[in-house]
DNA sequence: GGCCGGCCATGACACAGATCAAGGCAGCGT
DNA sequence: ACGCTGCCTTGATCTGTGTCATGGCCGGCC
C-alpha cells in the first residue's frame, strides 16, 4: 500500500516528461464539456500552453493528498477519480466521483492546501492546470473567468444536492439518484445512459451515500428483483428507466 | 404569509432608495472579515460604488427565491439568514446559516438563476453586490478575483464538511458541531463564544442537520442534563466547552 | 493451478432516531 | 384579557438501516 502511494502524488503530474503525453485540447473530444468550452483560437492556445499532462495514473494512485500545497486543479481526460476527505478518526468520506471532462480540486483554493484527497478508481489520464497561471490568464479572458466562477458554483450546487439527498432520502432513493447521475453524465459524453460499468466499489458507493455496503447490496438486489436493473457485479443495465426515476423520487 | 412574501423579494434589495441606508465599507466594523478584506484605498472605493444597500429585511422576508434570475451576491451586515432549497415534494432543505460578514448567493452563478432561496431569520441588513459589476471589477483587481475564488472554494469545503457530518455523525455530534461552528463565528466577530442566542428555530436546526425537531430537543435536554450547556429556549450558554468538543467528536 | 485477500450477497438481530401523541409555553392579534 | 397559533418538550412505540456473521466469487500472485 505504501509502495503504491510512493509512486503516486502530485509529483507525477506536472513533472517534466509531458512531451510523452502530448494531446491537445483541440483534438480532445471532451473539449466541448471541459474547461476549453469557453474559448477558441488564440485564447485556447494560451490555455493549452499552461496545461500539463503526464503519464496516466494507475488504479489506486493518489492524484493529490489532503493537506498538500494547492497548486493545480485537474481535469479528467479518461478513467475515473474519487475525491474524499479523511475524518479525525481515520475514516474516509467520499465527496465526489469525477468522470472524463469534469474538473476537480477546487476545494484547495481557499486555504492554499487541498481540503480533500483524490484517488484514481481505474487507469486514468489527467490534465493538471496550474492555478496561478489560470488565475492570471482568466483576468485577461473574461469568458474564462466567468467559466471558472461557473464551475465552482456548479460544484457548490452539486454538493447541496448531495446534502439534501443525505438529509432527506431513503437508501433506495439515494442509490437510484446516483445511478441516474452517472447515466446522465455518460449521456453527455455520448455513451450509453442505460448500460455502463461502475468504476467504483460498493464500498465507495456506500461511503458516498452515507450507507453501509450491505445496504447498497440489498438495494441493488431489490432493484434487480423488481426488474428495474440488471446487475452483474459492476456492470449495470437499466431496464426500466421510468421506474428508476420513480425510485429516485425527486433526488435528481 | 403571502403578504409577507409580497413585500420581500429581490425587488427590495437594490432598489432606488439606497441613500437612506448609506453605510460605507470604511466604517463597517465587518470589513475585515467581509468582501473588502482584500482591498484598500481606491480599490475599496470602486467596490463601494457598486454595492447596494436597502432597507432592512424583516424576519421571514425572502432575500431571493430559488429559480429567480441571478443578479447579485449578498453580504449579511446584521441579523441572520438561512439558505434553503425546496425538494420536489415541497419539503425544504436548509443548506446554510449566514451571519454578519458572511457572503451568500454564489450558487446562482453557474446557471444564471438562484439554486436556492434565502430568508431572514430576524431583522437583517444586507448588502447586495451586483455580480456582473463585481466580475468586471475583479478582472482589474487580482486581489479581488482571488478573494472571490477563495470565497467560493470555502463554500465548497464547508458544504463538504456538512456532507461528512450528515453521512457519518450521530445526532449529538451533529448538534454539538453546529453549536461549535456558531460559537467560532461569533468569536470572529468579537462576540461571546460561550453565550449567545440562536437566531433559528429548532425546526431549522433539525432540517439543516438531517434530524427531526424531537431529536434536536432531546439532544439539547441531554446536553443540559450533563452540564455541557444551559439552554433557555434560544439562549445558549456553553458551560463546558471541552465536553462540547468531545461531544462533537471530530465534527468540525 | 491453487491459494489468498478483497469484494459482494444475504440472513438474523439490535438500535438510533423517526413517528405518533399529548401537553406546556410564549407571542401576537383582537 | 383572551384565545389562538406556532414552537418546544417529553414519553411510548415503530422501523429502516446498521451490525454481526457466514459463505460465495473473482482476480492476482506464488
Image (cartoon, coloured by chain):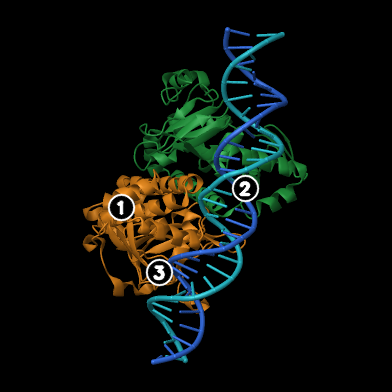
Chain colours: A orange, B green, C blue, D cyan
Label 1 element class: helix
Q: Which residue is mark 1?
A: A184
Q: Nearer the viewer, residue B217 or B105?
A: B217
Instruction: State if disc 3 and disc 1 touch (CB < 8 Å).
Output: no
Where is residue B5 drawn, in percent x and y? 45, 22
Label 3 element class: loop
Say which quarter of the image contains residue A58: bottom left
Which disc is residue B171 wearing?
Answer: 2
**Residue B122, above or below B222:** above
Give the crowd class for mark 1: few <14, some 14-19, many >=20 residues within 10 Å: some
Q: Chain of mark 3?
A: A
Badge 1 and badge 3 both on one subunit: yes
Horizontal side of residue B121 vs A63, given as left or right: right
Where is residue B245 drawn, in percent x and y? 69, 51
Where is residue B93 drawn, in percent x and y? 49, 39
Q: Chain of mark 1?
A: A
Give the crowd class for mark 2: few <14, some 14-19, many >=20 residues within 10 Å: many
Which disc is residue A13 wearing?
Answer: 3
Q: Can residue B188 be seen here?
A: no
Q: Mark 1 and mark 3: span between their CA atoms?
A: 29 Å
Earlier sequence position, callout 1 versus callout 3: 3
Q: Mark 3 and mark 2: span between their CA atoms?
A: 41 Å
Label 2 element class: helix
Label 1 vs label 2, nearer the camera: 2
Amino acid at each position: 500500500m505504501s509502495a503504491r502511494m510512493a509512486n503516486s502524488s502530485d509529483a507525477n503530474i506536472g513533472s517534466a516528461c509531458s512531451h510523452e503525453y502530448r494531446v491537445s485540447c483541440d483534438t480532445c473530444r471532451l473539449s466541448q464539456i471541459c474547461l476549453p468550452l469557453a474559448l477558441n483560437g488564440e485564447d485556447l492556445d494560451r490555455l493549452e500552453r499552461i496545461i500539463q499532462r503526464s503519464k496516466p495514473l494507475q488504479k489506486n494512485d493518489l492524484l493529490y493528498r489532503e493537506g498538500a500545497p494547492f497548486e493545480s486543479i485537474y481535469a479528467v481526460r479518461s478513467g475515473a477519480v474519487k475525491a474524499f476527505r479523511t475524518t479525525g478518526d481515520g475514516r474516509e468520506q467520499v465527496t465526489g466521483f469525477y468522470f472524463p471532462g469534469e474538473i476537480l480540486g477546487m476545494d484547495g483554493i481557499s486555504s492554499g492546501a487541498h481540503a480533500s484527497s483524490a484517488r484514481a478508481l481505474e487507469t486514468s489520464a489527467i490534465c493538471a492546470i496550474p492555478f496561478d497561471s489560470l488565475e492570471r490568464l482568466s483576468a485577461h479572458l473574461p469568458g474564462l473567468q466567468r467559466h471558472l466562477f461557473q464551475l465552482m458554483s456548479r460544484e457548490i450546487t452539486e454538493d447541496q444536492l448531495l446534502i439534501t439527498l443525505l438529509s432527506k432520502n431513503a437508501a433506495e432513493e439515494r442509490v437510484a439518484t446516483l445511478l441516474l447521475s452517472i447515466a446522465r453524465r455518460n449521456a453527455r459524453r455520448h455513451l450509453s445512459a442505460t448500460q455502463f460499468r461502475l468504476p467504483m466499489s460498493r464500498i465507495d458507493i456506500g461511503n458516498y451515500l452515507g450507507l453501509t455496503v450491505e445496504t447498497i447490496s440489498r438495494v441493488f438486489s431489490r432493484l434487480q428483483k423488481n426488474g428495474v436493473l440488471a446487475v452483474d457485479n459492476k456492470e449495470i443495465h437499466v431496464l426500466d428507466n421510468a421506474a428508476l426515476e420513480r425510485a429516485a423520487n425527486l433526488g435528481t
